Amino acid sequence: MDHSGGCHCGNIHVLLRLTKAPGENPLRACACSFCRAHQTRTVADPEGLFEVSADDWSLVEPYRFGSRTADYLVCRRCGVYVGAVCETTAGWRAVVNVNCLAERAQFIQEPSTPDYGGETNAARLARRAVNWMPAVVRR
Ligand SMILES: [Zn+2]
């Protein structure tokens, strides 16, 4: 199942390959203050693939906060958050904000609300290597 999307102004492009139909993918609404401010609903299919590109990378903010171990990709022009990428021992991994996809309405699972606040950086990176999805960042 392939899905496309991106930010609102059209600078950031995302492609998402999922192994399940949209309505069968578990979603997360992470409890951190960044995700709550953006009202994110994220998906990560470890068997899938995420690709992100931009017409102008100078307009893509790789926002870091907290443990500073991932880049939360926010468009500097329109403010949309498309997803986060992180370099792990397994390679680049990502979570994707399904709200940035054209078919956002098809993702109908009620999100779980995990709170990763107490995690060590080592545990965080190990979890992402397993649970986040393979990512290609096209610069
Ligand atoms: Zn934009």
Image (cartoon, rainbow, N blue to C red):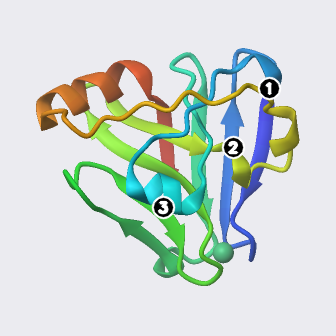
Residue at 12% across, 34% down: 120
Q: Is residue 19 above or below residue 60?
A: above
Q: Is residue 44 above or below residue 82?
A: above
Q: Secondary structure at mark 3?
A: strand
Q: Quadrant of ligand 1?
A: bottom right
Q: Residues within 10 Å of mark 3 (few under 14, many from 20)?
A: many
Q: Secondary structure at mark 2?
A: helix
- Looking at the image, residue 107 sits to the left or right of residue 96; the answer is right
State if disc 1 and disc 3 touch (CB < 8 Å).
no
Reading the chain from its start, which is encountered first: label 3 or label 1?
1
**Which is more toward the observer, 119 or 7?**
119
Q: Amino acid at mark 2?
A: Val
Point out the image quarter for the N terminus.
top right
Reading the chain from its start, which is encountered first: label 2 or label 3?
3
The image quarter in which residue 77 lies: bottom right
- Looking at the image, residue 138 sits to the left or right of residue 32; the answer is right
Q: Which residue is identified by label 2?
A: 98
Residue at 56% across, 27% down: 112
Q: Amino acid at mark 1?
A: Pro
What separation in Å lies between label 3 and label 1 (alpha carbons)?
A: 22 Å
State if disc 1 and disc 2 touch (CB < 8 Å).
yes
Q: Amino acid at mark 3?
A: Leu
The image quarter in which residue 3 lies: top right
Q: Position of residue 83 (x, y in %)?
A: 53, 50
The image quarter in which residue 107 lies: top right
State if disc 3 and disc 2 touch (CB < 8 Å).
no
Q: Secondary structure at mark 1?
A: helix
Q: Which residue is identified by label 1?
A: 22
Q: Residues within 10 Å of mark 2 (few under 14, many from 20)?
A: many
